Amino acid sequence: MTKLNSQDKNSFLYPRSYYYGQLKPENLVFNANLQEFAQKISYITSLETSGKLSPERAFRQIETLWKQLEDSKNNLEIGSDLSV
């Protein structure tokens, strides 16, 4: 059996997609945050579905992640200029 290096494991566990939007630093950072949010939501929902996490705890964790993503959007001022 072949050994997987750390890079391969991270690529498998935390897949990243390319960004095709307008190339601005704040957009790239927000995209990375959004992908991380989606990955964490996937883990939380899987744990809740399998009974390893209570619905209440899953909801609280998702709510916390949502607030963090919202803060990230506001701090990066994404969507603040309407002349896109």
Image (cartoon, grey):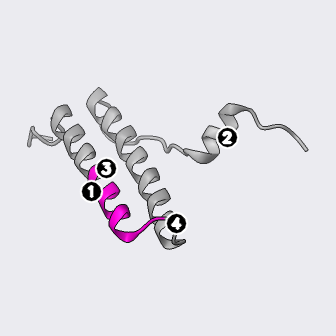
Task: Residue 28: give x, y in percent of width and height.
Answer: 35, 34
Specify few, some or many for label 2: CA neighbours under 10 Å numbering under 14, 14-19, or 20 or more.
Answer: few
- Sequence order check: which comes first, mark 3 or mark 4? 4
Q: Which residue is mark 3?
A: 65
Task: Residue 56: give x, y in percent of width and height.
Answer: 33, 67
Specify few, some or many for label 3: CA neighbours under 10 Å numbering under 14, 14-19, or 20 or more.
Answer: some
Task: Residue 6: give x, y in percent of width and height.
Answer: 68, 32
Specify few, some or many for label 1: CA neighbours under 10 Å numbering under 14, 14-19, or 20 or more.
Answer: few
Residue at 42 percent of width and 44 percent of height:
36
Q: Nearer the viewer, mark 1 or mark 4?
A: 4
The answer to whether the residues at label 1 and label 4 have Cβ atoms under 8 Å apart is: no
Q: Which of the pair 63/38 is nearer the observer?
A: 63
The answer to whether the residues at label 1 and label 2 have Cβ atoms under 8 Å apart is: no
Element marked by disc 2: helix
The answer to whether the residues at label 3 and label 1 have Cβ atoms under 8 Å apart is: yes
Q: Which mark is residue 84?
A: none
Residue at 15 percent of width and 39 percent of height:
74
- Sequence order check: which comes first, mark 1 or mark 2? 2
Q: Hey, what amino acid is under mark 1? A: Glu
Q: Hey, what amino acid is under mark 4? A: Lys
- Sequence order check: which comes first, mark 3 or mark 2? 2
The majority secondary structure of the magenta stretch comes to: helix
Q: Which mark is residue 9?
A: 2
Q: Which mark is residue 63?
A: 1
The answer to whether the residues at label 4 and label 2 have Cβ atoms under 8 Å apart is: no
Q: Nearer the viewer, mark 3 or mark 4?
A: 4
Cα separation, mark 4 vs mark 2, equals: 23 Å
> Which stretch did the figure color magenta?
53-64
